[in-house]
Image (cartoon, rainbow, N blue to C red):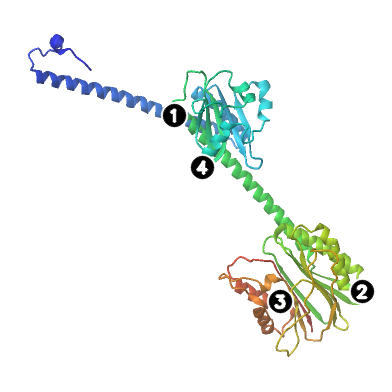
Amino acid sequence: MLIDYQSDWEEFGASGASHDERLTIIQGIALQTAAAVENTRLREAQQEEAYVSAALLQVAQAVANLNDLDEILSTIVRITPILTGVERCITFLWDDEQSVFRPAQSYGIPRDKEAVFLARRYAPGDFALLETVREHGRLLVYPLDAKGDGLAPPDPLADLMLPSERPLLAVPLAVKGDVLGVMLLEEASVSRRFRERRLEIITGIAQQAALAVQNDRLQQEMAERERLERELQLAHEIQQTFMPGQPPDLHGWELAFGWRAARRVAGDFYDFFELPDRRLGLVIADVADKGMPAALFMALTRTLMRAAALEETSPAAALARVNDLLVPDAQSGMFVTLFYAILSLEIGELTYANAGHNRPLLLRPGAEELEQLVKGEMALGVMEGIRYKEHAISLEPGDYLLFYTDGVSEAFSPEGEIYGEERLQATIQAVAGNSAQEMLDGIDDSVAAFIGDAAPSDDRTTMVLHWE
């Protein structure tokens, strides 16, 4: 503030004041004026901040009761021009599966062109402005941020949005650095620019849109998880129906069985079925995988095994037939180990063939050590033309025969120690002399105690045959 105090000092009513006194008065006036200007600026800033808060609150209230993402984004692209004065507003969402941007909702696109526009997809390279925002996660203003035509919208979009050289703002829809989409806004005139307070409103609106997109995706993921959970539960129930229930009256023989899936569905299975001439078919198998693929392969194997067992009187011939049928349908790396035996209930003769499965353990009364049945050949489903060897043993009253999958012997403790064959054999000997079910329970309790709180690493299936 400049004052000609020598010529006009009388107007201040201090014609008799000294030079220093006059300077003091002038400085006081200047300070008061500066304070008044600063107060005005503060009031204006407070008013601007209040408007920003009110604008964002208005957006929040407008979408508060909406659950559908399309409705939320439609509301946002229509309310944003009202609050910020932009000409057009479009939201693009990033599709991770297809790696493209797709227009979600728009305001300001001619109605006769909107449907075609919303059906478009923009792959990386089709729309450099969108891709740059997604890569760097920051807003860009075109053409202010562009050098040359590198960030220019493609011609079809230019025809729709840029009839003139009005600035275009691209704002990321991001949550914690994850860019879920982009909001594009076109200024109402060439001379107008995106100022600080308007940018604050726009970025605040974009943040609300991003949260809505994230919430919608989380809801979709939750719904998908619930659907998968229902399907897995149904698959588990269906798979349980594949497992036979109580065996028929075996007249002096006991058969106990246990099946525990590491996941909701399993690749292990056991089976038994009556055959002519008082014979009993016994099967235990383990698919080399877990989860749904293993469960499906298990169902296929069980079906083929039952069909082959009814037509082939030889266990070895039955395995060869199942193997040749499985190979064409086996996925890469998918195979199944399987032990199949035919027991004569009259004389105790057990005829068997083994396709790469764990060797069953035989405990005879009074024996100090368990016997292992003969090691088998290649697993089923690996290659065609395999011929399996057939073996036979004679069981005697009091004998126990344990069939099991490697989920039993290869169970792990929380410290990473393996259960092992030696511990399994010791457990069998410790519970010998009891019923088949009591032996099975003793083995299961021992393995469960060994595992403790550790998550099971594999399915566990056991079957105990006892000649009373």
Q: Amino acid at mark 1?
A: Val
Q: Which residue is mark 3?
A: 440
Q: Secondary structure at mark 3?
A: helix
Q: How many angstroms separate mark 1 from mark 4 (CA)?
A: 23 Å
Q: Amino acid at mark 3?
A: Leu
Q: Which residue is mark 2?
A: 276
Residue beneath the point at 21% across and 21% down:
30
Q: Is residue 339 left or right of residue 2?
A: right
Label 1 vs 2, first from the N-terminus: 1
Q: Amino acid at mark 2?
A: Pro
Residue beneath the point at 75% across and 88% down:
365
Q: Position of residue 245 (x, y in %)?
A: 79, 68
Residue 52, labelled with which disc?
Answer: 1
Q: Is residue 198 left or right of residue 353?
A: left
Evaluate if marks 1 and 4 touch, with contact meaning CB atoms under 8 Å apart: no
Q: Is residue 171 left or right of residue 26?
A: right
Label 1 vs 3, first from the N-terminus: 1
For the question of whether residue 108 can be seen, the reply is: no
Number of numbered discs overlaid on the protein picture: 4
- Quarter of the rendering occupied by the N terminus: top left
Q: Secondary structure at mark 2?
A: loop
Q: How many angstroms separate mark 2 from mark 3 (CA)?
A: 28 Å
Q: How many angstroms separate mark 2 from mark 4 (CA)?
A: 69 Å
Mark 3 crowd level (few <14, some 14–19, many ≥20, 10 Å Cα)? many
Residue beneath the point at 87% across and 69% down:
318
